Image (tube, rainbow, N blue to C red):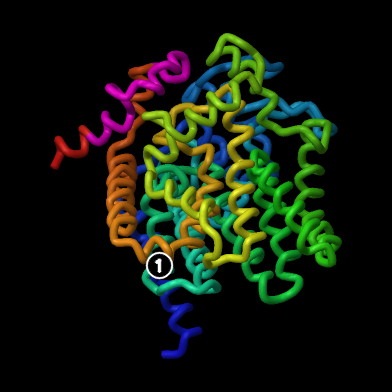
């Protein structure tokens, strides 16, 4: 079998097997943030519009959380009031991106059995399948990136599997209709074109398409997209005009949606409820009230939210920053490092730096592909040291066990019992952490 056919075969096997793993444990890990996308998809299917006017009474009585006042009465925080040229409407605070991805699946199911807003499990299960697909596809494209650089075949397979099973890709991105799964896929696709641009022209410009779509889907990715633009200004100036041109359609459509429903193309729909939720959770309406280093330390090392606590194998990304040479060109390594660092700014200063009720860390999930590529950059040096190989494998096995515990057992109970959205000190308690709670349940159940 020639190399190209082998790469295609491994890609499809990897995506299929990971999709199967994601779907084997058919639980739905959702919180209030992931609820509205399903009903926006239903509205698009039934009414041809993204407003939730017809579903607001049902959602208000079924999923009321952190309420705020509007002209429609009390609304849960994940629903906001739009007052643009379209008139007054109830809308999702997370836009329409995920809902658009759900529409084909909902349409197919609706042809078999007409869907209803009260089909809570059926809607959640369909959403879970779609998110699992995009999560598995992200791992597949990560493999295609690693094929482009001089690495062993084992490394090319192990790292995408570590990414898929040793991080919140398993416990968050694949298990509910969050924005994370599709956003991570788009980030990986952006990185694919970026790495590809090392050998051929114009591929850098193509990275603008997934980058702009990712930004529309998840505005918190703005620092990463700005880093990509800066990379283009420094190293790909001739391709920069085409890059900007290719980014415009998605940004223009997103701006048009926000202007039509909210009155400004520059508004972020979620900000309509930020102040009221911040007041409920922290006692202050300020949005960016957390000290950067406090939030950064919490996002990286909190015993109940730390990225490196729940996925310690990612610590090996730091190893690449202190050694010359490696699999990628130096400008790309700088971009990987700067991009992953840039994604810590907004979550770390956000009033809700811990991400609400969730398992482990979710705010930094879109930066994980960059960390994995940093590990790949010095993987040969790591593989040359038996000690580092053993340490990496220990960290990786622990990460997978941690994510399995979350996938199999997470039910939000620890967060609810400890009132983490009000009592933030519990997020720093090593003796009664979320991780110890669910690992304890896992091993007691064996």
Image: magenta residue range: 419-439
SS assignment at label 1: helix
The answer to whether 415 appears left or right of 82 in the picture is left
Q: Which residue is found at the position 49% from the left and 38% from the top?
A: 362
Residue 133: percent from the left, percent from the top?
Answer: 47, 58
Rendered view: 332 above or below 252: below
Q: Residues within 10 Å of mark 1 (few under 14, many from 20)?
A: some
Residue 64: percent from the left, percent from the top?
Answer: 50, 21
Residue 112 in sight: no
Would you identify the image quadrant in which residue 161 lies?
A: bottom left
The answer to whether 71 appears left or right of 31 in the picture is right
Q: Which residue is found at the position 66% from the left and 26% from the top?
A: 80
Q: Which residue is found at the position 63% from the left and 33% from the top?
A: 346
Rendered view: 390 above or below 297: below
Residue 19 in sight: yes
- Decide which of 291, 283 is in the foreground and name it: 291
The answer to whether 72 appears left or right of 430 in the picture is right
- Decide which of 64, 275 is in the foreground and name it: 275
423 in the magenta segment = yes
Residue 120: percent from the left, percent from the top?
Answer: 43, 38
- Decide which of 106, 196 is in the foreground and name it: 196
Q: Which residue is found at the position 54% from the left and 22% from the top?
A: 60
Q: Quadrant of the N terminus?
A: bottom left
Farthest-out residue, top: 283
Rendered view: 116 above or below 244: above
Q: Quadrant of the C terminus?
A: top left
Residue 15: percent from the left, percent from the top?
Answer: 43, 65
Would you identify the image quadrant in which residue 28 lies?
A: top left
Residue designated by label 1? 155
């Amino acid at each position: 079998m020639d190399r190209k056919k082998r790469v295609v075969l491994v890609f499809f096997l990897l995506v299929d097997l990971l999709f199967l793993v994601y779907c084997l444990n058919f639980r739905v890990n959702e919180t209030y943030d992931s609820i509205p996308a399903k009903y926006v998809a239903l509205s698009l299917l039934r009414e041809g519009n993204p407003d939730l006017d017809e579903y607001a009474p049902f959602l208000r009585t079924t999923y009321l959380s952190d309420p705020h006042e509007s002209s429609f009465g009390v609304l849960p925080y994940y629903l906001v009031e739009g007052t643009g040229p379209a008139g007054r409407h109830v809308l999702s605070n997370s836009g329409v991106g995920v809902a658009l991805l759900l529409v084909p699946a909902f349409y197919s199911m609706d042809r078999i059995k007409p869907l209803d807003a009260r089909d809570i499990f059926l809607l959640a299960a369909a959403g879970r399948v779609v998110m699992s697909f995009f999560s598995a596809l992200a791992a597949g494209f990560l493999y295609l990136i690693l094929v482009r650089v001089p690495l062993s075949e084992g490394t090319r397979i192990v790292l995408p599997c570590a990414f898929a099973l040793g991080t919140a890709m398993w416990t968050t991105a694949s298990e509910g209709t969050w924005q994370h799964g599709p956003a991570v896929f788009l980030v990986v696709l952006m990185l694919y074109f970026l790495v590809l641009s090392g050998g051929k022209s114009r591929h850098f410009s193509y990275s603008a398409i997934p980058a702009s779509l990712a930004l529309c889907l998840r505005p918190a990715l703005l620092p990463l997209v700005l880093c990509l633009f800066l990379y283009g200004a420094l190293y790909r100036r001739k391709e920069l005009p085409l890059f900007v041109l290719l980014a415009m359609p998605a940004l223009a459509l997103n701006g048009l949606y926000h202007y039509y429903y909210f009155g400004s193309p520059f508004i972020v729909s979620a900000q309509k409820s930020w102040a009221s939720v911040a007041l409920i959770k922290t006692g202050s309406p300020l949005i960016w009230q957390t000290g950067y280093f406090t939030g950064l330390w919490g996002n990286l090392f909190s015993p109940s939210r730390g990225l490196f606590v729940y996925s310690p194998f990612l610590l090996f990304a730091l190893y690449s920053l202190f050694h010359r040479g490696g699999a990628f060109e130096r400008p790309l390594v700088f971009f990987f490092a700067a991009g992953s660092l840039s994604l810590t700014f907004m979550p770390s200063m956000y009033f809700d730096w811990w991400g609400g009720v969730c398992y482990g860390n979710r705010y930094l999930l879109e930066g994980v592909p960059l960390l994995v590529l940093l590990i790949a950059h010095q993987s040969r040096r790591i593989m040359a040291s038996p000690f580092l190989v053993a340490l990496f494998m220990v960290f990786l096995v622990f990460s997978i066990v941690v994510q399995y515990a979350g996938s199999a057992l997470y039910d939000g109970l620890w967060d609810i019992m400890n009132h983490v959205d009000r009592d933030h000190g519990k997020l720093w308690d090593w003796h009664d952490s979320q991780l110890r709670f669910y690992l304890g349940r896992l091993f007691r159940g064996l």
